[in-house]
Image: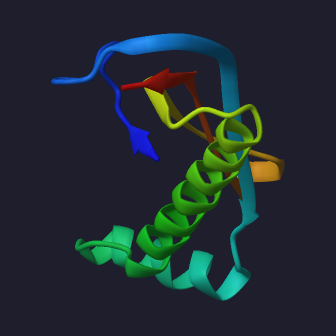
Amino acid sequence: MIMSTTPKLEHKQIKQYKGIVTGEAILGANIFKDFFAGIRDIVGGRSGAYEKELQSARRIAFEEMELKASSVGANAIVGIDIDYETIGANGSMLMVSVSGTAVIAE
């Protein structure tokens, strides 16, 4: 599956638009990860725990979107938009949502 944030694909022609496809992932943050991330924020540095959670959520959302595109017969997704949000009490959950247009490109 070709996936792109651009509306067109270089060296490919979009033959058919199959519709909008989406993928979402909501992951809860672990209390121990929150604690250690808070310490890192105080002393500086990157929060590896949150980076891994973010990468996992993004991967899940993209996989879900790709499955939906495949189910409608698409071989590519163009115009992909990625959004990140924290939700829940005190931002205790991380949401990643992706959307794009499923197409058949040749």
Q: Is residue 32 left or right of residue 44?
A: right
- Quadrant of the image occupied by residue 47: bottom left
Q: Could you tell me if residue 43 is visible in this image?
A: yes
Q: Residue at x 35, y 32 (%)?
A: 4
What x and y, as percent, mark residue 36? Answer: 50, 84
What x and y, as percent, mark residue 98? Answer: 58, 35
- Farthest residue in the left direction? 11
Q: Could you tell me if residue 92 is visible in this image?
A: no
- Farthest residue in the right direction? 89
For the residue pair 33 and 24, the one nearer the viewer reads as: 24
Q: Is residue 101 left or right of residue 90?
A: left
Q: Residue at x 36, y 77 (%)?
A: 40
What x and y, as percent, mark residue 17? Answer: 58, 11
Q: Residue at x 42, y 69 (%)?
A: 51
In the rendered image, the quadrant that contains the C terminus is top left
Q: Is residue 41 left or right of residue 66?
A: left
Position of residue 36 relative to residue 77, above or below, is below
Position of residue 88 relative to residue 102, above or below, is below
Q: Residue at x 47, y 34 (%)?
A: 76
For the residue pair 15 and 41, the one nearer the viewer reads as: 15
Q: How is the image coloured?
A: rainbow
- Quadrant of the image occupied by residue 63: bottom right
Instruction: Please state the total of marks drawn on the protein image.
Output: 0
Position of residue 45 relative to residue 85, above or below, is below
